[in-house]
Image (spheres, rainbow, N blue to C red):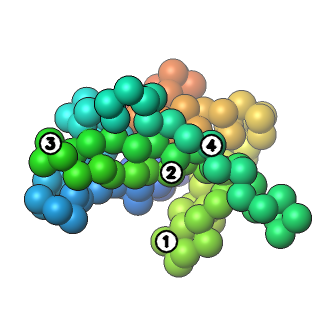
Amino acid sequence: MDYNTLLEGLQELSDTAFPRVCTNCGKEYPDLQTFIYETQQLEGRSGLMENVGCPDEGDEPIVELYRNCICGSTLMEFFSDRRDTSEVGLQRRQLFDNLLAQLVEMGVSTEEARNELKLFLSTGKSVLLEKMGIRTSF
């Protein structure tokens, strides 16, 4: 398997969730880290809310993160596992599955590969991928 193909897939996977743009003032948040750092916690609240959906209809729980933009507008990002059924969400899921298969083909266990991809998505870094010679900082 080609490491460059894997690297390109990791970059694409990371890029699909952001940038986020405030519809009120146009402020752009290029990544999750910037989104959290440059927005403010809602006054008197954590800003986190679990939405359990409707389990009878197959809905899985998601976590919603509410933050205030510098203009005061409330922004929301949601974090879920395979919840987004939009075209972009389906493409993102397929890409994740392809990257997972590539890592397994390279000798990484399925569980470890899944955990490293999720770690990469949340932090932009992966010790395992770095050890494999795959540069994860872009």
Q: Report the Cα–Cα distance between label 3 and label 1.
A: 28 Å
Query: Badge 3, how many Cα within 10 Å: few under 14, some, many 20+?
Result: few
From the image, tell me which residue sits under label 1: 88
From the image, tell me which residue sits under label 4: 50
User: Which image quadrant is residue 34 in?
Assistant: top left
From the image, tell me which residue sits under label 3: 70
Q: Is residue 138 visible?
A: no
Q: Is residue 27 visible?
A: yes
Q: Do the residues under discs 4 and 3 have CB atoms within 8 angstroms? A: no
Please provide percent x and percent y for residue 138: 28, 40
Residue at 11 percent of width and 59 percent of height: 25
Residue at 55 percent of width and 32 percent of height: 119
Residue at 13 percent of width and 48 percent of height: 71
Q: Is residue 57 left or right of residue 115?
A: right
Q: Report the Cα–Cα distance between label 4 and label 2.
A: 10 Å
Determine whether 68 is above or below 109 in the image.
below
Tell us which disc is closer to us: 3 or 2: 3
| Mark positioned earlier in the residue sequence (2 or 1) | 2
Query: Badge 2, how many Cα within 10 Å: few under 14, some, many 20+?
Result: some
Tell us which disc is closer to us: 4 or 1: 4
- Residue type highlighted by circle 1: Val
Observer-nearest of 104 and 35? 35
